Amino acid sequence: TYVVTENCIRCKYMDCVEVCPVDCFYAGENMLVINPDECIDCGVCEPECPAEAIFPDSDDRATAWAEANADYSKTWPNITRKGTPPADADEWKDKPGKGAMLSP
Ligand code: SF4
Ligand code: F3S
């Protein structure tokens, strides 16, 4: 499966949802996650993310976020269309240490 990581927090560009063939993204207030049971590992979302937030679960950068994706995707609503990203999304892009800012 692929995993959305903390780089998504407060960026939430949503380009990823437009390309996913199985619509397996779920939306929290300031980040998205992927349902690991639905993701077919196609990889097309990874290069679409302007914040480089998506990694395959085989990548070390995905490890800390795999459980959050599995858990939150059970309760957050499904999202299939790109909405309007946060007005300050670009300011948060590439900022480290956003993990604690997740709003579930
Ligand atoms: Fe969707 Fe493919 Fe990305 Fe999985 S890897 S979330 S199936 S676009
Ligand atoms: Fe997040 Fe990137 Fe998608 S910032 S919403 S994973 S395009």
Image (cartoon, rainbow, N blue to C red):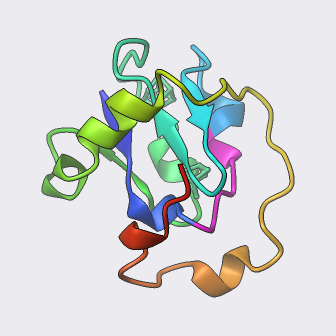
- Magenta-colored stretch includes residue 37: no
The boundaries of the magenta stretch are 10-16
Between 42 and 100, the one lying in front of the other is 100
64 sits left or right of 93 in the view? left
37 sits left or right of 9 in the view? left
14 sits left or right of 76 in the view? right
Can you give x and y, in whole percent of width and height, for residue 73 in the image? Answer: 47, 27
Query: Which residue is rendered at x = 66% and y = 51% of the image?
Result: 29
Query: Which residue is rendered at x = 79% and y = 41% of the image?
Result: 82
Q: Quadrant of residue 26?
A: top right
Instruction: Considering the whole magenta stretch, tell me its main secondary structure.
Output: loop
- Magenta-colored stretch includes residue 13: yes
65 above or below 85?
above
Q: Quadrant of residue 52?
A: bottom left
57 sits left or right of 6 in the view? left
Quadrant in which the N terminus appears? top left
Query: Which residue is rendered at x = 53% and y = 64% of the image?
Result: 9
- Report the number of discs: 0
Can you give x and y, in whole percent of width and height, for residue 12 in the image? Answer: 65, 57
83 above or below 10?
above
Between 15 and 38, the one lying in front of the other is 38
Query: Which residue is rendered at x = 59% and y = 26% of the image?
Result: 20
Can you give x and y, in whole percent of width and height, for residue 70 in the image? Answer: 34, 28
Can you give x and y, in whole percent of width and height, for residue 62 in the image? Answer: 24, 50
99 above or below 21?
below
92 above or below 84?
below
